[in-house]
Amino acid sequence: GTTWGLGGTCVNVGCIPKKLMHQAALLGSALKDAQHYGWNISQPVQHTWSVMAQGVQNYVKSLNWGHRVQLQEKKVKYFNIKGSFSDPHTVRGLTKAGKETVVTADNIVIATGGRPKYPTHVAGALEYGITSDDLFWLKKSPGKTIPSFILYVSLECAGFLTGIGLDTTVMMRSVPLRGFDQAQMASLVTEHMESYGTKFLKRCYPLKVEKLESDRLQVTWKNADLDNEETDSFNTVMWAVGRTPDIKTLNLETVGVKTNPETGKIIVDASEATSVPHIYAVGDITEGRPELTPTAIAAGKLLAQRLFGQSAELMDYDNVPTTVFTPLEYGCVGLSEEAAVQRHGSENIEVYHAYYKPLEFTVAERDATQCYMKMVCLREREQRILGLHFIGPNAGEVIQGFALGIKCGATYPQMMKTVGIHPTCAEEVTKLHITKRSGLDATVTGC
Amino acid sequence: MAQRLALQRLLALPTRGPLASHGRAFGTSAGRRNTFNVQDGSDFQDRVVNSPKPVVVDFHAQWCGPCKILGPRLEKLVSKLEGKVLMAKVDIDDHTDLAIEYEVSAVPTVLAMKNGDVVDKFVGIKDEDQLEAFLKKLIGA
């Protein structure tokens, strides 16, 4: 697979290239909208993959360098070696040139991150398929692509590939966005993607991938609904079936660091310590933690402060906001509706919701059918807000501010007292008043 | 590659007299005689640190836009000085340790080196006048 410089998954094959390519796709939509606003732009507008890829890859490389400089400035000694434990306080490694280096330490932190899984039971998956790790580093356009299975990675990639004009199909075995507010928000996101041009093969799973003479790939799959086999050819097959911790070569068993046998992740306590007291782990490889950049960074910082700075503060993993950067973005903080119902019972929950239309969509004659938001609150006493979910443009920017409110224990009455900024999409959150319970039509109209 | 470098050095040696015109007849541009890409740490030691002539060291990167403008601009001015100063180019991704050793943080970073010491330095892009002054100071001082 692809290799990269300092900065971890986020910088090299995650958030950064993803968001930049998502932006490339959004700009494509903006160019289409621009005509309605008076701009003379000849349609259809063309996109050149290599120009985008070079810009993105150059930026990532500049970040790799920036991290190297930072390590130097903070006087952190950097060994570019492939390491493994030889005993609980010793790491041994080999440089690319084959030279062995041994380092001992009082405290060791493991933060290797994950690598994409391949569906190895599918013939040809490993030889002919790529993963998102590779997608961001392609020099040539992936062409007609099929990001397969259904995780947020697959939807985000399918979204921007469609946005830049590529023929893209998502194959999904079961439900989209497992782990997020499933039933409703996930289906709104995928509905929008369908109207946007992404093809979906629902309730299908791949059987084999074969290479054709033309260099295209023939994919054969089972359609569970029709109970038959179907096939089509693509330029690129991209697997997005989850990531697995990159810890197999670390020799963890020898030193006694325990992992969850099902997930393969390292088991840690609230202080990020593994089963061996002076060995810690942070980030995507840890069991039960969100696979997000900010939580990994914060956990690492707090760990450092506890070890060397006389602090006792532990990482708070509650109410962590996040966003899926699909063409119509989905941002959320707090509990999903399902989780709230499970924890408190549906009689103790009030869900306020609204279908709204972003002002910018009006003149551009854009379809806003899936622009939606809901707020899950406790019904009793102060009516504390348990979760907020928003589908629309700039969802990440919208949710970030509200995450502070939820962290501070904001209540529904406090939200209603908060004056909205006009005209924005975010202001609709402060005006939510139609409950699911009432059964009333939740469409709200702005000015 | 080694042969071309050896040839360049051979051509660079006599800057006066009949051999100078032979140099031009071989077809190498004047610029390329005085500019070279650093191959590794010991190459840097030989041709920059131990250089009898002052050397301008251009730390650059593939992903750096301003570097692509500064590089040729500097090369052109160095070549006009006909061998009084040499120019060494260092790709910081290929030679990270060297770049770190010389405390490069942003690129482009250009060092002026004389007798193995860093006597001057600038970071970022400069125009021709500024570069001429920088080079004049290096050979004059």
Image (cartoon, helix red, strand yellow):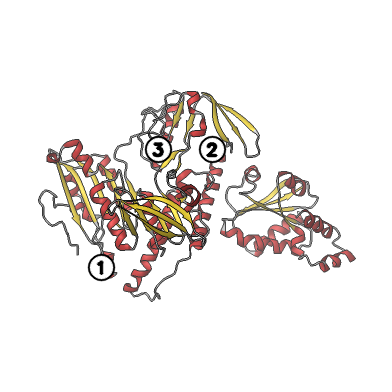
**SS for dot 1:** helix
**SS for dot 3:** helix
* Nearer-the-camera pick, A379 or A288: A288
**SS for dot 2:** loop
Split into 4 quadrants, where in the image is the C terminus of chain A? bottom left
Chain bearing mark 1: A
> Residue pushed farthest front?
A228
Label 1 environment density (alpha carbons within 10 Å; few <14, some 14–19, many ≥20): few
Q: How far apart are marks 3 and 1 (CA)?
A: 40 Å
Q: Where is residue A155 in the image (x, y as percent from the top left)?
A: 36, 53
Q: Position of residue A299 (x, y in %)?
A: 40, 35
Q: Determine which of the numbered discs, if any, sits on residue A362 in the image.
A: 1
* Residue type at the position of mark 2: Lys
Q: Where is residue B53 in the image (x, y as percent from the top left)?
A: 79, 52
Q: Earlier in the sequence, mark 3 or mark 2?
A: 2
Apparent side of residue B8 relative to residue A437 in the rendered image (left or right): right
* Nearer-the-camera pick, A63 or A284: A284
- For label 2, the residue is A74
The residue at the point 42 percent across, 24 percent down is: A275
* Residue type at the position of mark 3: Ala
Q: Is residue A303 above or below residue A351?
A: above
Chain bearing mark 3: A
- For label 3, the residue is A298
Q: Earlier in the sequence, mark 3 or mark 1?
A: 3
Q: Determine which of the numbered discs, if any, sits on residue A53 in the image.
A: none
Asked whether residue A333 appears in the rendered view, the answer is yes
